[in-house]
Amino acid sequence: MLRTAVGRAALLAILCWVAVPVAAGDVGFSADIGLEVSYAPLPPASYAIESDLRLSLSVPGFGLESMTTFDLSGFVEERVAILVDVGAVQIGEEIRFAPIFAWNDLSVDIHIAGVGIGFNWILGNIGSVQTPEFAMAMIVELSSQVACGFTLTSLTGFGAVDLVRVLGGDEAPFSVELLSLFEHLAYLVGPTAAIDVTLTPGFTFAEQLVRLTVDFDGLIASQTTWFDAGGLDAMQFELGYRFADPALRLLVGASLDGAFSMTGLTFVVDVQIDVVRATSWTVFAQPAFPFPLPIVFERQGFAVSFEICGVTVTSETDFDDSFLFAAEILAIEAVIPPVTFTSVTTFDGGGFAGESLRAEVSFSGVTLFSRAQFSWSGIDLAAFGFRVSF
């Protein structure tokens, strides 16, 4: 079964490799084909081997992406995404099998005169492979871009919660922008898969999200409010300012629950001087035990990044709620065409915690890559593969 599936996948890749260049010059066709094989040990004396075959095709107004995963037992997962763009209207569909049917998301987005209307119809399996249980949901999105940098977004979920994931999972959009160094290091340590909304049994109202953002003349602010079937659930506020010279950005964020009690407080300072960028991130949160103050210090993070001669060095230092050292991440990214090399070293309170290495070589639309992750216990993951772009 595995040999037959892999053979068919390889045949499809070869046919695309041969056929696509012929049509590319005529209709603006582009394609990417990639294959990755990974090895991971499974204690005490086993291992897992997986192969991911990725394929993407696009012509003006149409795009197709596919990812198929196999392991030693056979088929594991299949994801297919289709997007049709006809100007003011975009229609997309994503289907997944893992290994049985798991997810189907049909979306329609309409943008006219600065106003966006979107609909998502979702059918998903919220049970297990042995006992499937299917749930249906619909998400309605309304968005508008007003003058002076104002934007308004409303998401209404029927049979679905965690709607902020439709917006990328960012509860505080400007905080994510200012904390891009932390986000970049988190991606280098271990890229995470896209997360979905959570389906709930019954096709009834489940959650409402309303977001207002302002980005005008250096002022940045946002307010996000969540409602559930019981009424007001939570609120998130942001207020900050961007200074042009020197490049300095300040931001304060606060979160409240449905009873208007403060649940979190965040301070971000981001500054860039020439090739050096530094970010300070201070977080306060509700205490886990009874305490006179509603919020207490939770953690502190410092990130610094600079580039010299094509080499980018990024460092993150974290402290816990006891003001003690918690973690250190050091990333080195070097680009010496056609070679790209990335090293990420992680330390915790006990010393060395892990290392991640990745190397790429690109030439004539072909990229060969390999990556490895290891810790004191040995190799955690090893992978190699290629990508071909037309």
Image (cartoon, rainbow, N blue to C red):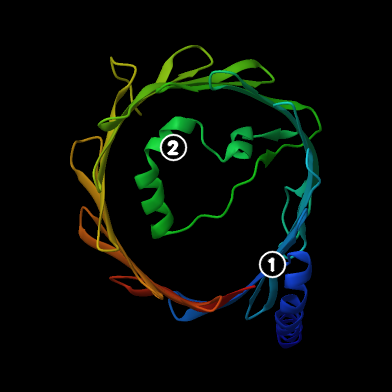
The count of marks equals 2
On screen, residue 177 versus residue 328, left or right, reads: right
Residue 79 makes an appearance in the image: no
The residue pinned by badge 2 equals 176
Q: Is residue 161 above or below residue 258?
A: below
- Quadrant in which residue 16 is drawn: bottom right
- Residue type, numbered disc 2: Val
On screen, residue 3 versus residue 379, left or right, reads: right
Q: Nearer the viewer, mark 1 or mark 2?
A: 1
The residue pinned by badge 1 equals 30
Residue 364 makes an appearance in the image: yes
Dot 2 falls on a residue whose secondary structure is helix
Q: Is residue 41 above or below residue 298?
A: below
- Residue displayed at 75% across by 85% down: 11
Q: Few, some or many C-alpha atoms within 10 Å of disc 2 (few <14, some 14-19, many ≥20)?
A: few
Expressed as whole percent of the image width and height from the top left, the position of residue 105 reads: 77, 47
- Residue type, numbered disc 1: Ser
N-term-proximal mark, 1 vs 2: 1
Cα separation, mark 1 vs mark 2, equals 32 Å
- Quadrant in which residue 287 is drawn: top left
- Residue sitting nearer the eye, 249 or 202: 249
Dot 1 falls on a residue whose secondary structure is strand
Q: Few, some or many C-alpha atoms within 10 Å of disc 1 (few <14, some 14-19, many ≥20)?
A: some
Expressed as whole percent of the image width and height from the top left, the position of residue 299 reads: 28, 36
- Quadrant in which residue 321 is drawn: top left
- Residue displayed at 34% across by 17% down: 294
Q: Quadrant of the N terminus?
A: bottom right
Q: Is residue 202 above or below residue 151?
A: below
